[in-house]
C-alpha cells in the first residue's frame, strides 16, 4: 500500500513539473532560479506528501554489533552418561526427548566384572576385620612384653595393606552405584542400574538391548534446559569491541517478533581457524522455552554516546550520499504559498531505538533547524526529477 502511495505522489510531482514547464516557458526570464540543493513545493504538494517537521536532538545512541549464535546449556547442566566398566545392555526405556530426574534408572548393564568386584570386596573386608583384631591383640601383647616388636610390625603391615585394598574396592563399588555398607554375601549381582546424574531431557540415545558397550562409549546425553546460555560467533575484526557486562538483544528466526535479553559474561580470547571467537552471554529470566541448539539472531550493544540524532525516516540516500531536508521558510510566488527546503548532506553513524546518529556539515549549527521527519522520500523524488518544483 505504501509503495502505491509513493508512486502516486511521484506521478503527481512529475505531472505537475511538466505542467509548469509547458505553461511557464514564456515567464522563464522572470522566474527566479534556485540552487541545486534547494527544493520548492507549493501548499498542495506539501499536504499531499504528508510532510511533518521535527528537530535535531542530543540523544544517547548505542553502538551495535550484529551476530549469530545458538542457545546452549551450561557445562554444569549437560551430562554424558557412560557405563564405567562397560558390559551388555540388559534393559532400557530411554528415548530421545524423555524427561528424567536425577537418580532415575536409565538402563541396566550386565557384566561379570561386577560380581568379581563384589566378591573381592567381601573377601577383603573379612580379611581386614581379622587383621584389625590381630593388630590390636599383638599391640597389647607387645605392651605387656609378651610379643616381639617384629611380630607387631608384621601384623601392622598386613592390617594397613588390607585397609588400602578395602578402601580402593569401596571407591570402585561406589562408582558403580553400589553402597559398600549395604553389600552382603546374599546381595551379589551381575546386573547394575545406570542412573541419571542430573535432571533434564534426554538429548541423544546410543544404546539398545543386547548391545555391548565400552567404558568410553557415551550411551546418552542429558540436558537441563532451565539454565541455558548464548554462544555467539564474533569475527576477528569485531572481537575487541565486546566486553563483559554488555547487553545483548536476541530473537529466534521462527519468532523474530519475540525479543529476549542477555548479558555478556565472557568474551572470546582465542580465535578459531576461521578467524572467529566465541562470546558467551547469560540469558535473563524469561518464561519462553529456549531449547539447547536453537539458532538465534543477536545484537550486542557495544557502547553508547551522546550524539546529534534524527529519526531514521528523516535520512534518505541519493548518489551514495545520505541527506536530510531542512525547512528554512516559505515565500509567495504568483500568489501561491511556496515552502522552501534544502538538502543537507550528513554522515550517518550508529542507529538505535528508531534514530540515526548524524554529523552535520562543518559550520552548520544544529539548533533551530526544522528537519523533515516524514515525507523525506517524497521530497527526494521531487529533488531528483526537478530543480524547480514550484510554479
Image (cartoon, rainbow, N blue to C red):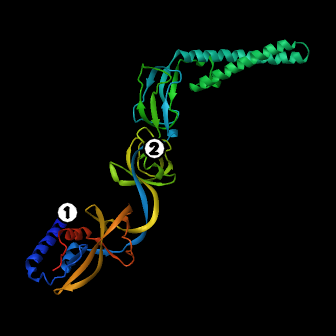
Q: In this view, does 203 lie above or below 63?
A: above
Q: Which residue is drawn at 32% across and 48% down?
A: 254
| Quarter of the image where one finds residue 157 | top right
| Quarter of the image where one finds residue 51 | bottom left
Query: Which residue is label 1 attached to?
Result: 3
Whether residue 354 is visible, yes or no, is no
Q: Is residue 264 above or below residue 130?
A: below
What is the CA distance from the residue labelled 1 to the residue labelled 2? 41 Å
- In the image, 206 versus 282, the foreground residue is 282
Q: Residue at x 41, y 56 (%)?
A: 64
| Quarter of the image where one finds residue 206 | top left
Q: In which quarter of the image is the C terminus?
A: bottom left
Observer-side mark, 1 or 2, equals 2
Q: Which residue is drawn at 91% across and 14% down?
A: 145
Helix, strand or loop at disc 2?
Answer: strand
- In the image, 269 versus 287, the foreground residue is 269
Most extreme residue toward the front is 29
Q: Is residue 318 left or right of residue 103?
A: left
Helix, strand or loop at disc 1?
Answer: helix
Looking at the picture, how far across and down is residue 233, in whole percent? 42, 45
Q: In this view, does 197 lie to the left or right of 334?
A: right
Most extreme residue toward the bottom is 335
Q: In this view, does 333 lie above or below 295?
A: below
Please tell me which of labels 1 and 2 falls first in the chain.
1
Query: Which residue is label 2 attached to?
Result: 278
Amino acid at each position: 500500500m505504501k509503495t502505491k502511495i509513493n508512486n502516486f505522489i511521484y506521478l503527481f510531482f512529475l505531472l505537475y513539473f511538466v505542467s509548469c514547464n509547458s505553461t511557464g516557458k514564456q515567464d522563464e526570464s522572470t522566474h527566479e532560479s534556485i540552487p541545486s540543493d534547494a527544493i520548492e513545493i507549493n501548499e498542495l504538494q506539501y499536504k499531499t506528501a504528508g510532510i511533518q517537521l521535527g528537530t535535531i536532538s542530543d540523544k544517547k545512541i548505542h553502538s551495535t554489533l550484529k551476530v549469530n549464535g545458538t542457545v546452549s546449556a551450561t557445562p554444569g547442566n549437560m551430562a554424558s552418561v557412560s557405563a564405567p566398566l562397560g558390559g551388555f545392555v540388559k534393559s532400557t526405556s530411554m528415548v530421545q526427548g524423555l524427561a528424567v530426574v536425577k537418580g532415575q534408572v536409565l538402563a541396566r548393564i550386565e557384566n561379570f566384572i561386577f560380581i568379581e568386584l563384589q566378591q573381592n570386596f567381601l573377601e577383603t573386608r573379612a580379611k581386614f576385620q581379622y587383621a584389625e583384631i590381630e593388630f590390636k591383640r599383638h599391640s597389647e601383647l607387645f605392651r605387656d612384653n609378651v610379643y616381639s616388636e617384629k611380630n607387631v610390625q608384621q601384623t601392622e603391615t598386613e592390617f594397613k595393606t588390607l585397609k588400602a585394598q578395602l578402601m580402593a574396592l569401596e571407591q570402585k563399588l561406589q562408582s558403580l552405584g553400589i553402597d559398600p555398607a549395604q553389600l552382603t554375601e546374599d546381595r551379589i549381582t551381575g546386573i547394575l542400574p545406570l542412573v541419571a546424574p542430573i535432571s533434564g531431557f534426554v538429548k541423544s540415545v546410543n544404546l539398545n538391548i543386547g548391545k555391548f558397550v565400552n567404558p568410553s562409549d557415551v550411551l546418552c546425553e542429558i540436558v537441563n534446559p532451565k539454565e541455558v546460555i548464548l554462544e555467539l560467533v564474533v569475527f576477528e575484526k569485531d572481537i575487541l569491541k565486546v566486553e563483559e557486562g554488555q547487553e545483548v538483544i536476541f530473537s529466534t528466526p521462527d519468532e523474530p517478533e519475540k525479543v529476549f535479553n542477555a548479558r555478556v559474561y565472557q568474551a572470546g580470547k582465542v580465535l578459531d581457524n576461521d578467524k572467529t571467537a566465541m562470546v558467551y552471554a547469560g540469558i535473563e529470566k524469561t518464561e519462553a522455552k529456549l531449547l539447547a541448539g536453537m539458532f538465534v539472531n543477536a545484537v550486542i550493544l557495544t557502547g553508547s554516546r551522546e550524539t546529534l540524532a534524527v529519526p531514521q525516516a528523516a535520512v534518505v540516500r541519493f548518489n551514495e550520499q545520505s541527506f536530510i531536508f531542512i525547512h528554512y521558510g516559505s515565500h509567495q510566488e504568483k500568489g501561491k504559498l511556496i515552502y522552501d527546503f534544502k538538502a543537507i548532506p550528513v554522515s550517518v553513524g550508529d542507529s538505535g531505538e528508531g534514530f540515526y546518529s548524524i554529523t552535520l556539515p562543518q559550520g552548520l549549527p544544529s539548533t533551530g533547524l526544522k528537519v523533515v521527519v516524514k515525507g523525506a522520500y517524497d521530497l527526494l523524488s521531487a529533488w531528483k526529477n526537478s530543480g524547480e518544483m514550484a510554479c
